[in-house]
Amino acid sequence: MGWEFLFAFCAAYVMIRTVRTFAPGLGLVDIPNDRSVHVHHIPRGAGIGFCLAAVSAVFLFHFDLILAYKWTFLAIFCVFAVGVLDDHRDTVPRTKFLVILFSTVLIALDGIVINDLGIVFGVPITLGWFALPFTLFAVTGFTNALNLIDGLDGLAATVSIVILGSFMWIGYLHADILMMAVAGAFIAALAAFLVFNWHPATIFMGDSGSLTLGFVISVLAIKSLAYIPTVSVLFIAALPILDTLVVMIRRKLNGRSVFSADKCHIHHVLKRFFEKNIRKTVFCLG
């Protein structure tokens, strides 16, 4: 699979440079606000480059997977498309939410659904008719959780590489080609992205990248449930999940909307602890 990963890395590098060059003219620019760590206008939409590169690698080297999981790849494209639209004109949250829900229904058509929660205190927990609603909740929650940690240069990409690496290893141990190919292609593409996104970043991934990554990781997490306990998946993806839960609980206790914006995420807290040293913060969380 070495050639596949090399292709994904090189294609992502070229595509991201292209996006960075034309981003201002296409309206793909991140404008600083009171929660931003940058003070200048930075191009965004690098996710367009590395997501297209990763999927292209799978298409060229594992076309049989595209045919076998056609609904899954259509779902990934739908999430990617709404992410691109958001990078261009800031789509309302409801639109993104509905697209993610629709995309989760699509992956269920390929049998990628959470049917049980494993064995809890010696009792097997089977979801039955609640399987699809629970899958909708889990995928939507994690997709947005990864989107929320995309707040420092290199953070979302580094965390995603670690999580994807775990799922790639699980796929390798159990000869699951889908998990190996998709995780490996995205790891290679993200490695190219880090060339541009390591602090100080010259381009951001945008929602085209963070939403797609969150959704892809959700798909791989559900696939991995065939091989590992549910609690193991929670440990693998613990950082974005716990960060989102803690922040939402804190907002609720303070009488604020759980969806309101603030600077209380774990990366904000650690950045203050490390005296605003972004690289130390990312190394610590990665």
Image (tube, helix red, strand yellow):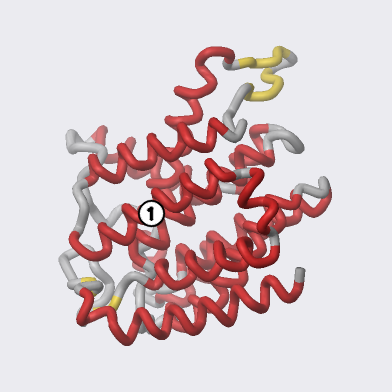
Q: Quadrant of the C terminus?
A: bottom right
Pointer 1 local density, CA inside 10 Å: few below 14, some 14–19, many at least 20: many
Query: In x, y percent, where is residue 137?
Result: 43, 30
**Which quadrant of the figure has residue 101?**
top left
Query: In x, y percent, where is residue 153?
Result: 40, 73
Along the line of sight, the residue nearer the viewer: 220 or 26: 26
**Which quadrant of the figure has residue 55?**
bottom right
In the image: residue 3, left or right of residue 197: right
Amino acid marked by disc 1: Asn
Instruction: Identify the residue under disc 1.
Output: 147
Q: Is residue 286 visible?
A: no
Residue located 39% across and 68% down the image? 205
Query: In x, y percent, where is residue 107?
Result: 53, 37
Q: Is residue 206 above or below residue 75?
A: below
Residue located 50% across and 29% down the image? 135
Q: Identify the secondary structure beneath mark 1.
A: helix
Residue located 18% across and 72% down the image? 31
In the image: residue 166, left or right of residue 194: right
Query: In x, y percent, where is residue 217?
Result: 55, 50
Q: Is residue 96 visible?
A: yes
